[in-house]
Image (cartoon, rainbow, N blue to C red):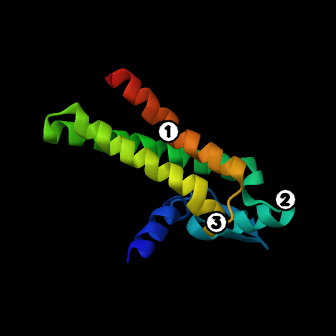
Amino acid sequence: MLKHLYSLLLEIPNRLYPFTTTVDGKTLSGIDAYNARLLICTEKFGNPFACKDLFIYREAFHLIGALVVIAVAYGIEKIFTSPLAGFIFLGIFVLFITVQEAYIHPHFYHQLCWKGVADWLAWCIPIGIYLLFRL
């Protein structure tokens, strides 16, 4: 069940892809357009994220995700009436993102190192800025 939930979370950007892609004269949207664009980029460059549009789209989604996580941490601070609760939540989250980008994605999804670094930065820079302003 946990693996299924993790897969659903990973697919959120794919399902919400707002652009269309034309393949063989047929216009695709949503996850179909995303998957078609992924295939086109993989065939053309050998790496789907060598296409700047997909790379920027995914990193923007990571940035939005980081802002959501910051909002959750802020809510946790208010619920527990202590900034420490939010700091602990964010610390655990950053640890999870680090394990995800350094181990899980390279080993199970064959993610390249540079993509993991970019993803980690997109998640952790906003969180770091938030923590700096909270101290």
Residue 18 seen in the figure: no
Q: CA distance from mark 3 to mark 2?
A: 21 Å
Dot 3 amino acid type: His
Near-viewer residue (129 or 11): 129
- Sooner in the amino-acid sequence: mark 3 or mark 1: 3
Dot 2 amino acid type: Phe
Q: CA distance from mark 2 to mark 1?
A: 28 Å
Q: Quadrant of the C terminus?
A: top left
Give the x, y percent position of residue 67: 41, 40
Query: In the image, which is nearer the foreground, mark 2 or mark 1?
Result: 1
Q: Quadrant of the N terminus?
A: bottom left
Dot 1 amino acid type: Cys
Which residue was labeled with disc 1? 124
Query: In the image, which is nearer the foreground, mark 3 or mark 1?
Result: 3
Which residue was labeled with disc 3? 107
Residue 79 seen in the figure: yes
Q: CA distance from mark 3 to mark 1?
A: 21 Å
Give the x, y percent position of residue 81: 14, 35
SS state under label 1: helix
